[in-house]
Amino acid sequence: MSFSFTEVFLSQFILMFIAIVTGLMFGKIKFGKFSFGISGALFTGLVIGWGAFKYASSIEAGKSGYDAAQNLISSGVISSNFFDIFLIVFVCAVGLLAAKDIGIVLRKYGLKFVALGLLITFMSAAATYTLTLFSKDSNPYEISGVYTGALTSSPGLAAAIETARGHATEKSESYDTMGDSEKIKFLEMAGVKDIPKDVQSFKITDDVKNQFITNAEGSIGAGHAIGYPFGVLIVILAVNFFPNIFKIDVEKEKLQYREELSDARKQSSHVKVIKETKFDIAGFILACMFGYIIGNINIYLPFIGYFSLGSTGGVLIGALILGYIGKIGSISFRMDSNTLGILRDIALAFFLAIVGLKYGYQAVDALVGTGAYLGVASVIIGVIGMLIGFGVGKYVLKINWPMLSGAICGGMTSTPGLGAAVEALGSDEPAAGYGATYPFALLGMVIFTIILHKLPM
């Protein structure tokens, strides 16, 4: 009989289980009247992910557990497959729960959600560009990556990498026309170790140009990895603390929203009542599959190019559509809310723990190391976008808090934030606001990411 503590401790399953259990325990701790609930798994995941990566990096070749440590490092602590599957299950459950009233919600709030989705992403992009102007010692491509990370957008990341490649190529071709300081920064970003004093007479090779382009793409990814956990944390804290900061009577706003919805239902007399089933496994899987297909459809826009909704947007839209339809033949998409709620909470706990484990090392490293500026940048970008979105949504568009909390999460394209909003309100009402805002925010992310790289940096 043998047992390797290192191999078991560094197992992805054990790390997830530990993060969830400790996270739920942490989530029950009261800070005044507030507690983090399921979101606690994110915080413990960050700490455990950082510790596991640090421990794995310290194991030398030939020592017990070295292979397990290398597997953990190469997979980024947790495999992206775990990230994707629990995200899909969570989003599908939320979409099916919110689907019943989505038609009424869109008719009543539709244009407001479009405005919020584009406004939040635009203001965050403006804040990003401003930060690039002040980042003389930092890499502007990393700041651009932080934008996609602070708004937790994988499609935005894909667009940023693609446009950074074009921007870096143009920049490398214009090397001869640069000034001294710009050339020095170019060579530093290209990884040139011995930079000559007379940079004007220094001629770069194709290898240097290619390395600059490669490093530009890598910087986008690094910025995204650092910005992502901070973006998640900001949204979770916002949906929990905004009601206290801005003196919002949550119960009153929930009642107001339900009265508005009730009046809208009465005006929509054609809405048919569909009987709920306990749980339809085929219906749930079909909703996941249908949404995943939608998420992989590439949509072409003139001057912008192709973009897709990704698994998050696609599965949410797919679940909302099928849930709204209610039933196809013997397959039901209207399921018991308690059953879907349990499935949603389990998937959310795993998803948040995985986010923490996957990005824990970068987040802690950003706080204490050279990435501190990027960590601060992600906080600034996220806070500006959310505050302006909240101010316009609450005081200009007059959207009630249950809808607005979901719309803010949708504008930030933050699925963990949606989970926190749902838990904080004790209902799935924010999901409708999230689902209606998300596609337009995602479109804004792609557009403004491309525009960012067209501007001088």
Image: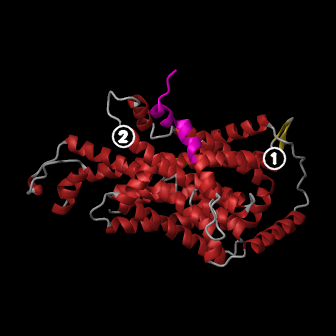
Q: How many marks?
A: 2
SS type, badge 1: helix
SS type, badge 2: helix
Q: Which mark is residue 57?
A: 2
Residue 415 visible in the displayed image: no
Where does residue 334 sit, x and y in percent of width and height?
A: 83, 46
Give the overall secondary structure of the magenta segment. helix
Q: Per the image, is 185 magenta?
A: no
Location of the C terminus (image quadrant)? bottom left
Where does residue 344 sit, x and y in percent of width and height?
A: 70, 48
How far, Cα to Cα, is label 1 from label 2?
Answer: 51 Å
For mark 1, what is the residue?
325
* Residue 291 against residue 446 in the figure, above or below: above
Q: Per the image, is 16 magenta?
A: yes
* Residue 22 against residue 64 in the figure, above or below: below
In this rendering, the label closer to the viewer, 1 or 2 = 2
- Point 70% across, 70% down: residue: 401
Residue 51 visible in the displayed image: yes
- Point 70% across, 57% down: residue: 431
Label 2 environment density (alpha carbons within 10 Å; few <14, some 14–19, many ≥20): some
The residue type indicated by label 1 comes to Ile
Foreground residue, 30 or 111? 30
Would residue 433 appear left or right of 99 to someone viewing this image?
A: left
- Residues at marks 1 and 2 touching, judged by CB atoms closer than 8 Å: no
The range drawn in magenta is: 1-19
Label 1 environment density (alpha carbons within 10 Å; few <14, some 14–19, many ≥20): some
Where does residue 202 sit, x and y in percent of width and height?
A: 11, 51
Considering every residue shown, the one lying at the far top of the view is 1
Quarter occupied by residue 261: bottom right
Quarter occupied by residue 369: bottom left
